[in-house]
Amino acid sequence: FSQRRAGLRQAQEMAKAAYNRKVNIASELSKFIDALVSSGRIQGGAVHWAKYFSELWDEMDERAQDPQDIWGIPTGFTDFDKVTGGLQPGELMLLSGIPGVGKSMFAMQMAEQMAAHAPGAIYSLEMGGKQVARRIVSAAAKVTTRKLKTGRVEEDEWPVIVQAIERLSKLPVYMSDATGWTTTSLRADIARLKAAYGLQWFVFDYLLLANDALQQDETERTAIISRGMKLLCRHLDVAGVSIHSMNKAGMDGTPAQKNLRGSGQVSYDADLIVFLTEFQVMDQFDDASIPLDDRANLRTLIFGKGRELENPKKYLHMVKRPHYPMFGDYTGL
């Protein structure tokens, strides 16, 4: 509307000048053309690229004052952060894998650990908020979820649970378990949280539960939702993690981008794609060095896509802790 108003003002002034015989019309037209071009500039239009080299230099100079191997938001998983540099503002990560492998658990633990460094939000459309809280407390207190469900908590476990809840309650994490989210309403809520609390990341569980384009088929829906998620991250400059499911072809063997469910557009939109699977022997070194007894408690994290990954192997192994809903770096059980 501002561009329309500016254009109308310039048109009115031009009409007045045309009717005024005392005005040098050639000179005035040149001024009006310049003014119209200026008022009609597209927001975000192309500028000389020296601007971006200048911004890059400023960033490099700032980081040189305090060099760090992790330049994004640390996830708390050391091996993962070495490969990715942490989660990057403005980028969308897709976490995929077969059902029951621990995708939500991994993402929620990542959220808790990122909260030690930056405020963030969790949108849990698959699990209720209390269920998410139970899992996180179980992992933090090292008390099984079964005990938390049944109330059969040992006397000496209560203080540990209380301490865990007190610590977690102070973290800058904002959570919703509502099921009506669209990428548009999500964007509005994240913009609100960023303005109010300095939000820097979000976790969305999971992509196809967003209510965008419900009248469309699955292929069109995933394209619309993934595009909305990507633009949200880019425009609000926040790091996003969205869980996404795989098609049937990806249930066996080593998954790849083609195994993501729905439209292939999701592969283009995501900046980082990670597959969480049951333990897989990825090379001869794995087969020789990882004991058989360890393998039952391992998961393999495969990097399907990454713009600036620094791990030539494209995978790493994670420990899925027995009895507790939590993961850890694999250094030998």
Image (cartoon, rainbow, N blue to C red):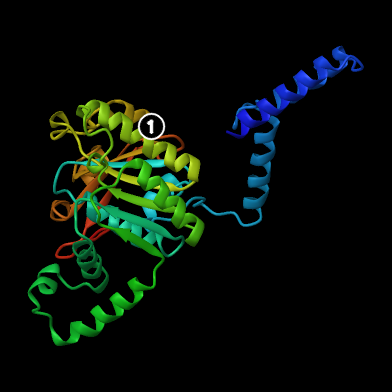
The quadrant of the image that shows the N terminus is: top right
Residue under the point 29% across and 25% down: 264
Q: Position of residue 143 (x, y in %)?
A: 18, 73
Q: Is residue 290 visible?
A: no
Give the class, few, some or many, for how many residues have Cα within 10 Å of label 1's Cα (few <14, many ≥20).
many
Q: Position of residue 320 (x, y in %)?
A: 21, 56
Question: In the image, is 263 to the left or to the right of 295?
Answer: right
Question: In the image, is 51 to the left or to the right of 100?
Answer: right
Residue under the point 46% across and 60% down: 118
Work out whether 258 lies above or below 133.
above
Residue under the point 33% across and 71% down: 168
Q: Is residue 23 visible?
A: yes
Q: Which residue is mark 1?
A: 269
The quadrant of the image that shows the C terminus is: bottom left
Q: Nearer the viewer, residue 146 or 120?
A: 120
User: So how many labels did they put on this image?
Assistant: 1
- Provide the secondary structure element on which disc 1 rests: helix
Work out whether 214 lies above or below 20.
below
Residue under the point 37% across and 39% down: 229
Q: Amino acid at mark 1?
A: Asp
